[in-house]
Image (spheres, rainbow, N blue to C red):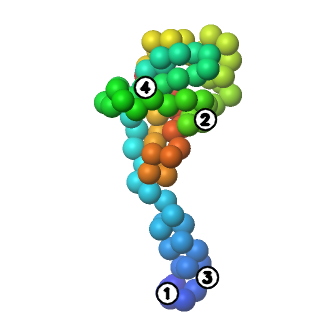
Amino acid sequence: MDNETSIKHMLVKIVQDCMSPTMIEEGIITKREPLSVTLVNDKKMKLSKTDLILPARLEKEGALETGDKVNLLICNNGKIYYVLDKS
């Protein structure tokens, strides 16, 4: 049984406190170079390459084109947007 002063319990608490709930949103590629994505549910939210984490398999030429819809994992209170895959 863990007690509240154990190192494991304290580390778990720190990690839980630092993690915010994650959400999945849909975005549309509005520009390929430089990469730009607009959220479907919030047209005012435009994300640039610096806002996005793009997996290597989607960085290949032709993997994403203007108009493609993508699923975005939103973490850290909207500070990190990870492109999961095409919708």
Q: Position of residue 78 (x, y in %)?
A: 45, 45
Name the residue beneath numbered marker 3: 7
Mark 1 nearby-residue class (10 Å; few <14, some 14–19, many ≥20): few
Camera-side residue of 58 and 45? 45
Work out how far the residue at label 4 is from the one at label 2, CA to CA, in angstroms.
14 Å
Which is closer to the viewer, label 1 or label 4? 4
What amino acid type is highlighted by mark number 2? Thr
Mark earlier in primary sequence (4, 3) = 3
Q: Secondary structure at mark 1?
A: loop
Residue at 58% x, 15% y: name it: 32
Tag 2 residue:
50
Please state if 87 lies on the left or on the right of 57 as rendered. left
The relative height of residue 10 versus residue 73 in the rendered view (above or below) is: below
Image quarter of residue 11: bottom right
Quadrant, the C terminus: top left
* Alpha carbons under labels 1 and 2: distance apart: 39 Å
Disc nearer the start of the sequence (1/2) = 1
What's the residue type where badge 3 is placed? Ile
Residue at the image position 58 percent from the left and 86 percent from the top: 6
User: Picture quarter containing residue 25?
Assistant: top left
Q: CA distance from mark 3 to mark 1?
A: 8 Å
Amino acid carrying label 4: it is: Thr
How many neighbours does mark 3 have within 10 angstroms: few (below 14), some (14-19), or many (20 or more)?
few
- The label number, if any, that marks residue 4 in the structure image: 1
Frontmost of labels 4 and 3 is: 4
Residue depicted at 45% across the width and 29% down the height: 46
Q: Residues within 10 Å of mark 4 (few under 14, many from 20)?
A: many
> Which comes before the other along the chain, label 1 or label 4?
1
Which residue of the protein is positioned furthest toward the front in this rendering? 44
In the image, 15 versus 76, the foreground residue is: 76
Q: Which of pointers 3 and 2 lies earlier in the amino acid sequence? A: 3
